[in-house]
Structures are given as C-alpha cells and as structure tokens.
Amino acid sequence: MDSLFTEQERRRYDRQIMLPDWGIKGQKQVKEATVFIAGAGGLGSPAAIYLAVAGAGTIRICDDGEVEHSNLNRQILHMEADIDKKKVFSAQRRLQALNPYVKVEPLFDRVATDTVERLVGGAQIILDCLDNLHTRLVLNEYAVKKRLPLIHGAVHGLAGQLTFIHPPETPCLRCIFPGNPPRDTFPVVGAAPGIIGAFQALEALKHITGIGETLKGKLLIMDGETMEFSQVRVRKNPGCPVCG
C-alpha cells in the first residue's frame, strides 16, 4: 500500500479499492480532493456522510443555520442534543467521528455573491445541497465563471431530482430552471433527501475517480411514491444570461 495511507485506512477503504477502475490510484484521487458542500441539511447530511466515509480528503461544509426540532426527520448529521447549535459544528463532529482521516472545515456563513469565492476556496467540485433557488443560482454563476463542476440536488415531499452541471460542456442551472419560484417551507420525507444526497456523493466520487458516467446533460427525476426513476435530456439555452 502506498505510504499516503495507513494500514487502518487500507482496511477502511478496502472494498472500494477492490473496484478495478478505482484501485489505489482512485483512492489517492479521493484523498487529495477538496469538496465544497453548500448546506448541512437534508441533502448535505447524506452527501457529506458518504463522502467522508469514502475518504474525501477535505470537506468544506457551509451553512448559516442552527439545528431546529423540525430538521431532525431528515438532517441526519444532527441530534436532539444539537438543538440551537450551529449546524456546521455538529456536522463537523459527526463526520470526524465517522472518519478521523478526513479534514472537515465548518463554514458558518451564507453563500452570497460577495462570499461565494471565499467559501468555495480551493474546492475542485461543488455540491448544491441548498433549499432555495436564489442561493443555488449564486453557486451556479460562480461555477460557470470558474468552470467548476456543480452537482445539483433537490427534493419535495417524496420526490427528488439530480443533475451534473459542468460549464461550458453542459447547460447551467439557469438554463434548466429559468424562473424564480417563491421561497417557502415545503414538505419532505427524510428518506427522499437521503436518496438524492447519497446520489450527489456518488456523482462526486465518479467525477473525482473518473469512473462511469455522470449525469452531464441529463436531469434524473425520482418519484418516490411510485418508485419510478426517469432521465430527461437538458439543453443549453443560447440566450441564457449566465452561460449563453
């Protein structure tokens, strides 16, 4: 085993290193990666957990919220004892407890036009685990500007959606969602963001290691009520104000 890994790490990651296209090279790529996760809630929790246990070297997790009782049906990084505490710090504690070999950087801040560059920092990939389109579009504009891959996930009730955005190769988020829906509180069953957040982590790991195909140019739609999954082709809007 390469000296980059301890014997304990070798045993920890053994099952994924067994993958023919992953191996020690892929594990090195995962360990050397820096991932930015916007949101430590229903989507960010499972996404961060699966990236941490896979050995993602640095996880920058950003959220400006505190844990509330209404979060606990889906935000599995947080517990009853974390009520009224900052989400990013309970997230850091849980992730470090799951895997002490990864570095978790908690960022108690809001993603905005004047903060996004500082918050994303040196990350090579962005996970959009937010719950409102306005802030998602700030991330989208930054990803387009820097040509960074952006993995978008969203849920409502028992439904969810997922896509892999990588300008200029793919449409950006504004191409796919040109409107501005109002911000509101929406229903959600915890297992739905659990599934979509795990898929976001999987897409990130595929991109980092070069395994398989990501959802570039495709929107995955999950109907949790019927357990039907479908993919819709998405195309660039030539008149898009962000990437057109």
Image: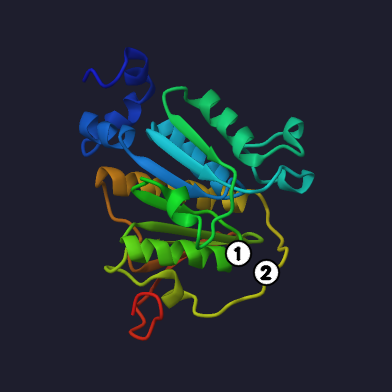
Quarter of the rendering containing residue 164: bottom left
Q: Quadrant of the N terminus?
A: top left
Q: Which residue is mark 1?
A: 132
Q: Percent position (x, y) of residue 65?
A: 67, 48
Q: Nearer the viewer, residue 160 or 48?
A: 48
Give the structural element (helix, strand or loop) at label 2.
loop
Q: Are marks 1 and 2 in contact (CB under 8 Å)?
A: yes
Residue 79 placement, left or right of 103: right
Q: Percent position (x, y) of residue 177?
A: 49, 75
Q: How is the image coloured?
A: rainbow
Q: Which residue is mark 2?
A: 183
Q: Which mark is residue 196?
A: none
Q: Quadrant of the C terminus?
A: bottom left
**Residue at left 33%, top 57%?**
148
Residue 94 placement, left or right of 121: right
Tell me how far mark 1 sits from mark 2, CA to CA: 6 Å
Q: Nearer the viewer, residue 231 or 84?
A: 84
- Specify which label sits upstream in the sequence, 1 or 2: 1
Q: Count how many numbered circles sit on residues in the image.
A: 2
Amino acid at circle 2: Arg
**Residue at left 57%, top 47%?**
194
Q: Residue furthest front?
A: 114
**Residue at left 68%, top 57%?**
188
Q: Percent position (x, y) of residue 84?
A: 76, 39
Residue 48 placement, left or right of 168: right
Disc 1 crowd rating (10 Å Cα; few below 14, some 14-19, many 20+) is: some
